[in-house]
Amino acid sequence: MNNLEEKYFWMLFDTCNKPLYYQDIHNILSLPYDFIVRYNYSSINLSRNAIKRADSYPNILKDVLLVYGQNESFKKGDDKDKYDSSQKINWIFTRFAKIAHIYKNGSDYYFDLILKEYPNTNDIIPKEKIIGELSGKKQTPYNLWVAISYLYDDFKCLLKNGNKYNNWSSIVDCFHNNTQFKNDSFWQIRGPFNLKNYELITPRHEDICIKEENKKRVISKISYFFVNNFQKFCFEIVNREPRNNEVNKNLINLSKRKLRKILIKDESNKITTQQSSIPLRSYFSNNIRFSVNPSRIIAQQESIISFKTVPQQTKWPIGPNIKIVFRIGWPWYQLIFGTFFLVLGPLLSFNANNIANGNSLISNIFFIGGTLSLFLGAYILFKKLN
């Protein structure tokens, strides 16, 4: 069996001993389906098999299982060196992904991951088999953070009873159950959805390249959403707060000083929303509507909408902090027909006499038709048609 047909999957681990990595957990649980995130690891954190496959990675999408691990006695802010190998590690399977690209720079490996479904947390047997096999080989934290597993049938079992959105709340409950994330806010972004037909707008992926010795080399893959000029769309945001009574009491006391909320902002002002912030409750679902502002610039533009959990009182995040890139352009039919009528209008108006061969009635008809064509072209290009 060649490498293209071989059934295996990647295991990428998080332990989140530092604020930057701590943010990763929140973000991968929050970001939309098919969005690309980047993980990076030093070569000393990869198994030999993982290094071998990363160095000769084929241009195909391979499965990934993202996993969080925490020592039972671990407290937020503890240093990695305090890890006690004799203590049990609690494992939480966080999300499925596909490897879009692997980029090596020196001894560092960069994994561009397309986020997919959420694993089924209720099926304990495949979880124990997958972790048990790698632990036996000492290919889990705090020995290694990237490994290869061949238990593909068990991997598929974790996909049962799940889809793009199922299982998310169960995973969040695991984090609220005696982990360093137990006091945190978790929320998930679904969409965006086109408000014209309520269809899902899927992310587009793009290669970022450099030239080396006259050859193009892909150094990363990114994702963005393409929306049309004047388009309206919405995101659904689902929130889940800790259910533990003691934790809720602390959150209530905190809310008296400063309520937790999601701040929404587009610094470019190319996309607007009437809801610049959303208060976080115990659990809720909210649709946030956005409008692409009118623009007369034909070239494609870019806008970045940020979603941030506040207040952040310490260096440790209390919730997701993400940025979503939008590319704004013209619909092809709007651009073609608008330009056609804009060009046709002056041609008819200025050549009305020549076309009519001196007939004033026909000349006036062509002149009026040209004027109407000009206004129609302007309307198609610069007015909302949907």
Image (cartoon, rainbow, N blue to C red):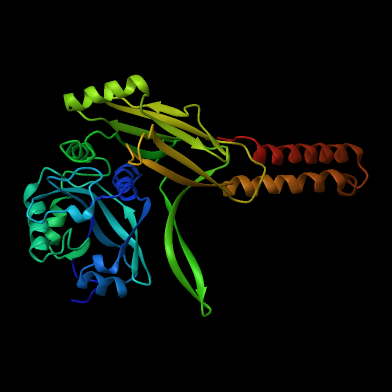
In percent of the image, x 76 and y 36: which residue is there? 372
Where is residue 94 drawn, in percent x and y? Answer: 22, 47
Relative placement, left or right, of 280 versus 118 is: right
The percent position of residue 161, horizontal first and vertical second, equals 16, 43
Outermost residue, top direction? 256
Q: Does any portion of residue 10 appear in the rendered image?
A: no
Quarter of the figure with residue 348: top right
> Residue 308: x and y, percent?
41, 37
Q: Which quadrant of the figure contains the N terminus?
A: bottom left
The quadrant of the picture occupied by the C terminus is: top right
Give the image quarter of residue 108: bottom left
Most extreme residue toward the bottom is: 213
Can residue 381 be spotted in the picture?
yes
Residue drawn at point x = 42 percent, y = 38 percent: 307
Q: Residue at x 31, y 32 (%)?
A: 238
Please report the residue visible at 65 percent of the width from the left and 39 percent of the height from the top: 380
Is residue 294 positioned above or below 133 on the image? above
Residue 224 location (% of width, % of height) = 46, 50
The tally of labels here is 0
In this rendering, is residue 229 above or below 10?
Answer: above
Q: 383 or 288: which is nearer to us?
A: 288
